[in-house]
Image (cartoon, rainbow, N blue to C red):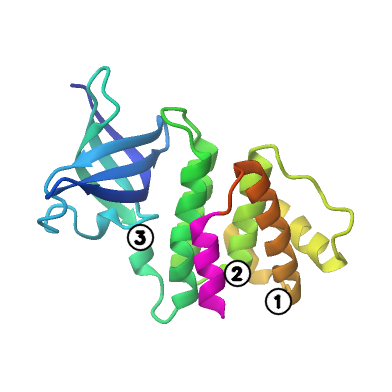
Amino acid sequence: MPLFTSEALILRTYALGESDRIVVFLTRDRGKKRGVAKNARQSRRRFGGALEPMTCGLVTYREREGRDLAFVEQIAPTQSPLCIPAGADDALGHVGYFAELIDEWAQDNDPNETLFRLGASVVDAMTAGIAVEPLARYFEYWLLRLQGVYEADPRASAGARAFLDAARTCSPFGLQDVTVAVTVLRELEAAHRAKIAMHLEKELKSARVLREMRR
C-alpha cells in the first residue's frame, strides 16, 4: 500500500464500528480523501484534537488500489480552531459551516490547491482574531467565485459592492482594515445563501444552526 503525507484540512469525521472513525480530509495535492482512523473513538491519545473540523496539518495515510477508504496513520496539526482566542464563540460557531462548505464543493481525488489554500487561510485568520462575520462573507464570495458561479447583483447596495471590491483584492487578514456595516453583512449573507442553495440544490445544515445561534 503506497504511503502518502500531505498537507490537509480535516472536514468531518463519523463513527465506524465501536472504536474507529472515518475521517474526511482535503489534501493540498490529491483532492478530497476518506480514511479510517483506527481506535480513534476509544483513545484520544493517538489523534487528540487533530480530528476537529478545519484542523490543518500533515496527514499520513495509506491507500489500497481499488478501495475507497484509506488508512490514516498519523495527523500532525499545524493550525487548529482550538487556537481561536478565548471568548470568540461566534468564530467557533462558524467552524462547522466553513468545513461543510468545503466538503460540499471539494471533489474526491480531484486536486484543488486553491480551495485548500482558501480554507487554510480562513483558519489562520480565525486564530489571529479576525472578525468572523466579514470573514464568512469573504469566504463565501471567494468560494462561489472560484467555482465560477458568482454573478454580481445589480441591486446590491453601495456598501455591499464596496465590501466585495475590497474582498477581491485583499487577504483574509486585510479584512481588519475593511469597515463594513452589520446591515451590509446581513445583505451579503442572504445573497450568498441563495446562491449557495441554488448551486448545491439544498440548504446547508450548518447555515441553519448559525441562524439559530444568532436568535
Q: Residue at x 26, y 55 (%)?
A: 50
Q: Image check: 146 left or right of 156? A: left
Q: Image check: 168 left or right of 3? A: right
Task: Say whether residue 128 is visible.
Answer: no
Q: Residue at x 26, y 31 (%)?
A: 69
Q: Which-is-in-front pick, marks 2 and 3?
A: 2
Mark 2 closeness class: few <14, some 14–19, many ≥20 residues within 10 Å: some
Q: Which-is-in-front pick, marks 1 and 3?
A: 1
Which quarter of the rendering shows the C terminus? Answer: bottom right
Contact between labelled residues 2 and 1, with CB atoms less than 8 Å apart: yes
| Residue 208 vs residue 25, the one in the foreground | 208
Read off the residue under disc 2.
Answer: 133
Could you say which disc has been placed on residue 182 in the image?
1
Residue 80, percent across and down? 35, 60
Residue 213 is a magenta residue: yes
Task: Tell me which numbered mark, 1 or 3, is placed earlier along the sequence.
Answer: 3
Element type where label 3 sits in the image: loop
Task: Tell me which numbered mark, 2 or 3, is placed earlier along the sequence.
Answer: 3
Tell me which segment is drawn in magenta.
204-215
Read off the residue under disc 3.
Answer: 80
Q: Say if 194 sits above or below 7 in the image.
A: below
Q: Which quadrant of the view contains residue 136?
A: bottom right
Instruction: Tell me the distance, in whole angstroms, between the alpha carbons under discs 1 and 2.
Output: 9 Å
Residue 196, percent across and down? 64, 49
Task: Tell me which numbered mark, 1 or 2, is placed earlier along the sequence.
Answer: 2
Q: Image check: 40 left or right of 57? A: left
